[in-house]
Image (cartoon, helix red, strand yellow):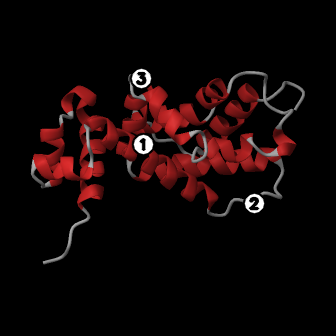
Amino acid sequence: MIPTDRPAAIRRALRDLVAERGFHGASMASVAKRAGVATGTAYVHYSSKEEVVFATYLEIKSDLAEAVLEGYREEANPRERWHHVLVKCFEHLGAEPERARFLTQLEESPYYEEARARLAHAGDPLSLIAGESDLAGLFVDLPFEVIYSLSLGVVVRLVASGVALKPKELEQLVDSTWRAATQPDV
């Protein structure tokens, strides 16, 4: 018998159920059933539904950041880095749209503030470029959450809603988000 990564199965089950039904449709019993484990086993790995939510969020953001780092060039100009981050996010999330649907559900839930605090932007792909010194003066003077909503948040919502963009449309999206998030004279 092949060993199963039960915590990973539980996180994936939660992600998929939240993507399909929202948080109210993702009880620990339904998560355990979808993961193919007993409810008690789910609680052995995670003390509560909230802990599974936070672990799933961190995993999705970490995987997204890892995907963005592939081919990322710090020496590229800011606009090229912006392009890279948004396109990689669109491609990565588009490969498994359940991730984007989970993120949209989470961003509108009472779990979001705690999830963000646990992440502390360290694994957010947008923080890769937002934190780089040569970009400090390029963004409009708005909180990080607003810049996120104008950029990566748009990508997440489009993927979550099933919007497929042609390459030219994706380029237009990148251009539009760049104009929305940076100072007019950039």
Q: Secondary structure at mark 2?
A: loop
Q: Secondary structure at mark 1?
A: helix
- Closer to us: 174 or 21: 21
Q: Secondary structure at mark 3?
A: loop
**Residue under pointer 2:** 73
Judge whether 69 appears above or below 158 on screen: below
Q: Residues within 10 Å of mark 1 (few under 14, many from 20)?
A: many
Q: Amino acid at mark 2?
A: Arg
Residue drawn at (73%, 28%), measured in percent from left and top? 181
Q: Residues within 10 Å of mark 3 (few under 14, many from 20)?
A: few
Q: Residues within 10 Å of mark 2 (few under 14, many from 20)?
A: few
Q: Residue 7 appears at what percent x and percent y?
A: 27, 56
Q: Residue 148 appears at what percent x and percent y?
A: 61, 31
Question: Relative to residue 66, is residue 96 drawn left or right?
Answer: left
The reply to whether callout 1 and callout 2 are in contact (CB within 8 Å) is no
Q: Nearer the viewer, mark 3 or mark 1?
A: 1
Q: Amino acid at mark 1?
A: Tyr
Q: Residue 129 appears at what percent x and percent y?
A: 73, 45
Give the CA separation, mark 3 to mark 2: 33 Å
**Residue under pointer 3:** 108
Question: Relative to residue 160, is residue 74 drawn left or right?
Answer: right
Q: Nearer the viewer, mark 1 or mark 2?
A: 1
Question: Relative to residue 100, is residue 49 drawn left or right?
Answer: left
- The image's mark for residue 57 is 1
